[in-house]
Amino acid sequence: MNSKAYIAGILSALTLIAIGTGAYLLGRNTQGRGNRDSNPSPTAITPLRTPSPIDLVTPTQNPQTTGKDTVQAAVVSKNYSSLTAYMTNPISVRIEASECCNPMSPTDAVEQLKYLNSAKGTWDFNNQEVISGLEASYPENYGNAIIGVSSDNYLVGFQLNSQNSISKISMSVSYKLLLP
């Protein structure tokens, strides 16, 4: 009987050690997760440039000349760089249904406008059904905007600020993503 008690004692001790080790490791892993969730520490910090109010409203050219004909000619000819003189610096650029983009320089906005190069159709800047729908449904992006729709449904909107400068560009592979 002594040997049975001796074996039972050893097994009890090993069980307690296993439970203690498991609890220690579980507590250590839970504590590490709790710290990450409650106090995130970034791996890389990217400083953001905060535009001054002067940058946002100061066009590089006379804003009175920004007009539908100018924008339409630039889009149809794919000569987007001709619009930089009419853009605020920085300018907000959006591509619908994507993570793109943030405020950027007019030069960078021209690069983003090359997204429209995939449009194979002709451009219409007088499609009142689409323009009215976008202005009513999405005034923050298409209100007071020059809006063009290609015959293969690409969409571009150039929103003008109070100084008649292009302050926001919104684009989409299809206006149907926004309007039923």
Image: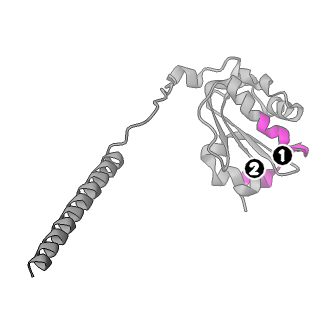
Of the numbered discs 1 and 2, the one sitting upstream in the chain is 1
Where is residue 80? Give x, y as percent. Answer: 80, 28
Q: Is residue 36 inside the magenta stretch?
A: no
- Which of the pair 143/36 is nearer the observer? 36
Magenta stretch: give its range.
114-132
For the rendered model, the colour scheme is one colour
Residue receiving disc 1: 126
Residue receiving disc 2: 131
Q: Quote the CA–CA distance across marks 1 and 2.
A: 8 Å
On the rendered structure, is 62 left or right of 40? right
Please report the residue visible at 75 percent of the width from the left and 49 percent of the height from the top. Answer: 131
Residue type at numbered disc 2:
Ile
Where is residue 126? Give x, y as percent. Answer: 83, 46
Please report the residue visible at 82 percent of the width from the left and 50 percent of the height from the top. Answer: 127
Residue type at numbered disc 1:
Asn
Please report the residue visible at 65 percent of the width from the left and 47 percent of the height from the top. Answer: 98
The image quarter in which residue 24 lies: bottom left
